Image (cartoon, rainbow, N blue to C red):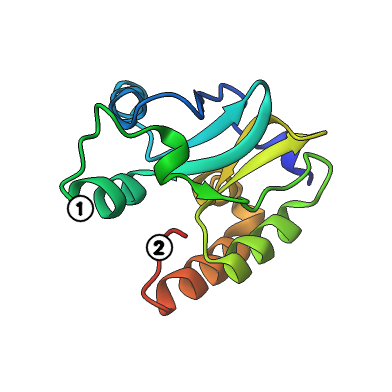
Amino acid sequence: MKIKDIMSTDVKSVSTESTVNEAAKLMKEENIGFIPVVEGDILRGVITDRDIILRCVAEKSDYNKLTAKEIMSEKPVYISPEHSVTEAARLMAREQVRRLPVCEEGKVIGVLSLGDISRSKSYFSETAAAFCDISGNGKINK
């Protein structure tokens, strides 16, 4: 099975110049813990709920003034929609991430999460292995 068959395609994103507050509000509205950061249509980074806590709240920074570019994880790991689900699970485990932007020519066209993979019973073992690898080191997100 390919990633394009199970990825989420209703992707919400923020621009590099969006404030952290705008990103956090969108994450709350959409009930998501991960958001791609784009410049134009091109993926430039990602922000997770953990990034906001560690790089903004814990630092007592003004999230109304900080931009997404200032707290995003740069050079995010991403994958093509044509890769297999097994390859994605292995990549998630190796990079210790629970979500991957799915890109074509640098443009975000979807997001793949461990949850997306786990919904397919045939990939339960890959999901379990990836989750164990990610959790084993005490890291949930990069």
| Amino acid type assigned to the residue bearing label 2 in the image | Ile
What residue is disc 1 on?
59
Residue appearing at x 18%, y 54% in the figure: 58
Query: How packed is label 2: few (under 14 Cα within 10 Å), some, or many (20 or more)?
Result: some
Label 1 is placed on what type of residue?
A: Glu
Q: Is residue 128 above or below residue 117?
A: below
Mark pair 2, 1: CA separation: 20 Å
* Numbered label attached to residue 94: none
Disc 2 to disc 1: CB gap under 8 Å: no
Instruction: Indicate which disc, 2 or 1, sits on the residue closer to the N terminus.
Output: 1
Percent across and percent down for residue 116 are 56, 43
Residue visible at 15% across and 47% down in the picture = 60
In front here: 129 or 42?
42
**In the picture shown, does residue 126 fall above or below 13?**
below
Circle 1 residues within 10 Å: few <14, some 14–19, many ≥20: few
- Please tell me in which quadrant of the rendered image residue 33 appears: top left
Which residue shows up at 25% across the image and 46% down it?
56
Instruction: State whether residue 21 is above or below residue 92.
Output: above
Which element is circle 2 on?
loop
Q: Nearer the viewer, mark 2 or mark 1?
A: 1
User: 48 or 116: nearer the eye?
Assistant: 48
The residue under the point 40% across, 69% down is: 139
Label 1 residue SS: loop
Q: What percent of the width, then of the height, locates residue 43?
A: 65, 35
Q: Which mark is residue 140?
A: 2
In the displayed structure image, the side of residue 104 where residue 33 appears, left or right: left
Is residue 44 left or right of 104 when viewed as pictured?
A: left
